[in-house]
Image: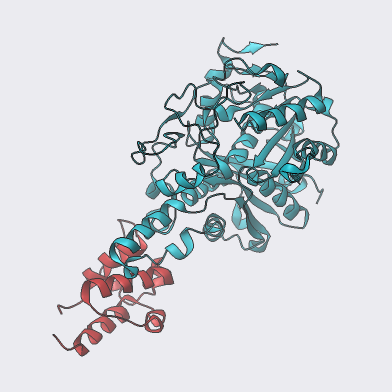
Chain colours: A cyan, B red
Amino acid sequence: MTGTVVVTGLGVIAPGGDDTEAFWRTLLAGRRSIGRIDRFAPDRYRTRLAGQVHGFHAKERVGSRVAVQTDLFTQFGLAASDMALADAGLDMAAVPEYERAVVVASSSGGTEFGQREIERLWRNGPDHVGAYQSIAWFYAATTGQVSIRHGMRGPCGVICAEQAGALDAVGQARRLIRDGARAALTGGTDASLCPYGLTAQLAAGRLYQGDDPARAYRPFAADTAGFVPGEGGAILVVEDAAAAAERGARQYGTVAGYAATFDPRPDSGREPGLRRAAELALADAGRAPGDVDVVFADAAGVRELDRIEAAALTALFEPYGVPVTAPKTMTGRLYAGGAALDLVSALLAVRDGVVPPTVGIGRPAADGRLDLVLDHPRRLAVRTVLVLARGFGGFNAAVVVTAPDAAHARAPQPSEGADHASIHRR
Amino acid sequence: MRQFTVDDLERLLRASGGGDEHMDFSEDILDEEFSELGYDSLAILEMSALIKREFGVELADEEVAELQTPRQAIDLVNQRAAEVPIT
């Protein structure tokens, strides 16, 4: 036990790619995966665009038995977990079952499954509500199913902190490893693009309401008009650094720092907690702002929230003091999956030395004074990344990831996007 | 009521708890435990709801919880059906 917690496996199910490398290529190509909702007819809803996962066949990915018992958000979590474990090359049989932990984030729970059962209740009566409703709707459904699938009988939990949740989950997974768990699956997924789920999201009043994907989600633009919801997420395998090294695992990076804060009352006049979360995470990592190579922003797409984030970043790093990016402009905001996906992108940026872009926002607002990585990926030696996330209702979280020792590092993957001439070199 | 057969059981079990297409529901699985076949208690509970809907046979939750094998389920449903006066 070193107390150092490293990431050894990644799994992604997201708009633009239902495996890690496909998703990464999409990001580096700067391709937006936002379109009209085709899961149901969205005409009568104020929000009609979303980042959807296409071509995901649940029965093939998780097995037909599990497929009938679970909501899509859990199926995403199971498929991403399988992928992450395979990527980590972790032989579960070699890990004592009570030292296998699962802690993931969920924001909406199993809304689509729940809606289907409520429809049956109203249409046909209570005898027609399926028995699996009892477990499928629940926020912890993914945690439970992952735990069952891989015999993970150690500490298990779910964190619900809206878009901040996945960073909190990773922070909690790090605690569990430090407390003696041998390996943990962490991250988060969400899938709430059904009428019930979308209606619940609309209530917060932050969603883009038009039909133009190019105008839909433009954080840090002066005329931003909200954000686009998305579905999917990512799962990461984290382990104690010494144990990972002992089994010869290749690492993506270290979870070097984590912090969470909560905003003061909106009418208090006090500063929101985002800057403090970032400072605390850097302090936890033993890093100074000058060490940070790139920031993955929360990028709310809501003018006031963008201002708050830009102010936090310029206070910490000076105006234009650090490259800032928001690849979620290509996927929409994935709720519990969003920050998990950003962590994956941050770790792949470390691996490949390239930062994925913020796409299609046009000219950033002048008052932001951020060095945004716009429209094209940027070649950059990435050793230290700050990932920020905010959840509706006042949650702030920050994670600092750092590059692994060269001896244990993953080999860079040459990709079409990264080798493309369009990459900006600075 | 017509007989509740192994084919009925297979159909309703697949509908309630899923199942891979390769699994052979022949006679020799009749005495295997549901858990061995990959069906948990919720799948059996769900199957009992489908039996009630289709065959009109209502099993108590406690009875359902006791069911261990396909044969026990088939026997119980047919026995209970025989007790129900035909109206």
Above or below A369: residue A421: above
For image coordinates 38% across by 50% down, the residue present is: A59
| Relative to A116, A108 lies left or right | right
Mark yes or no: residue A246 visible: yes
Q: List x then y, in percent, for residue A43.
A: 35, 36
Above or below A190: residue A221: above
Q: List x then y, in percent, for residue A381.
A: 72, 21
Using the image as rendered, state which of residue A153 and residue A175 is in the foreground: A175
Mark yes or no: residue B5 visible: no
For image coordinates 48% across by 58% down, the residue present is: A137
Find residue A353 and report its image quarter: top right
Find residue A245 and report its image quarter: top right
Q: List x then y, in percent, for residue A69.
A: 42, 59
For image coordinates 60% across by 13% down, the residue present is: A423
Above or below A74: residue A217: above
Using the image as rendered, state which of residue A309 and residue B76 is in the foreground: A309
Quadrant placement of the C terminus of chain A: top right
Above or below A149: residue A253: above
